[in-house]
Image: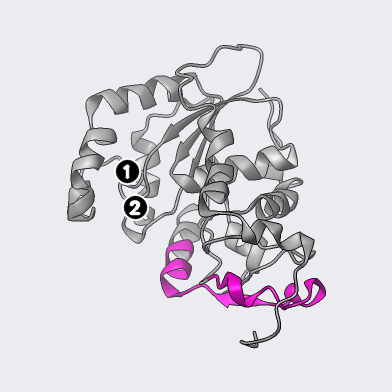
Amino acid sequence: MITKGAPWRFNPNDIYMLTTLTARTNYVNDRYFSLYKRVGFRDSDRLKALLIGDSFSQDFYNMIAEAGILSGAEFRVNYIQAACQIYRGQDDPFAFINEADKTSCKRDVYNDQFIALQDKLIADADVAIFAASWLQWSAERLNKTIANFNIPQKAKVIVIGRKHFGAIAIKEYFSIPLDRRNVLRNDVGADHLETNAIMKKAFENQTRIKFVDLHAIVCGEESRSCPIFTPEGLLISFDGAHLTEAGAKYIGSLLKDHPTFVLSK
């Protein structure tokens, strides 16, 4: 339990918690968006990897970059804002999207031009990776969504599960020594767990589609809570959803030997 009102003690490892939201967000964005305007694959001799998703796909790219996973691959990204979700199917996605987001989703995602760009990238990819802040409605339809992407048989398909670290209270953490922080955990909520369970069940008998259960890897298979800090006492997420640099390095290290990412052209 965190004791409020404890004396503040500065630790140089806490410098990241003192940075601005802009600086934290820049870490999430910068590496990913350096790829954003690269439309097609260029190097026929490298593994061609397409990463599709929202800001969670940015976190995923930071994880694997920090850990050197798929370092020889040529990556392209296809960004879909979380409000819109990744979906292809006969149901009307706008029945599930919030009213305030419908205009931007129609303009940026659910239109022929954007879909044509996706199809071109997918047709050329050796591996398609889907990583997002999945909502229950899109998670329930993800199997059919992936089928409707018409991914070539030669391509491998990887789905990255949800991650969530609960409510982050940065000001309350400063007085806690680094060697005591790694026992702190947050409840992550029923919605996160239910959606993750839907995805796990949907892909458990799949052979072509590999599901990477981030919740199980980081938090524990049956756990309802997740760690707030790395084993070294560094903050994993600054807002409960997106990763700090320390968080990306930590989770990347957990994924480094995962058999799903042992890929070759």
Query: What label sits on residue 87 in the rendered view?
Result: 1
Q: Residue at x 52, y 54 (%)?
A: 21
What is the magenta range? 168-196
Q: Position of residue 8 (x, y in %)?
A: 70, 77
Q: Residue at x 47, y 27 (%)?
A: 36
Q: Distance between the residues labelled 1 and 2?
A: 6 Å
Q: How crowded is mark 1: few (under 14 residues within 10 Å), some or many (20 or more)?
A: many
Q: Which of 110 and 194 is in front in this view?
A: 110
Q: Is mark 2 on a helix, strand or loop?
A: helix
Q: Position of residue 33 (x, y in %)?
A: 51, 32
Q: Which residue is drawn at 19% across and 46% down?
A: 102
Q: Position of residue 16 (x, y in %)?
A: 66, 56
Kind of residue at badge 1: Tyr
Report which residue position mark 2 lands on.
138
User: Would you place residue 203 above or below residue 74 in this image?
Assistant: below
* Residue 105 within the segment the image draws in magenta: no
* Residue 178 within the segment the image draws in magenta: yes
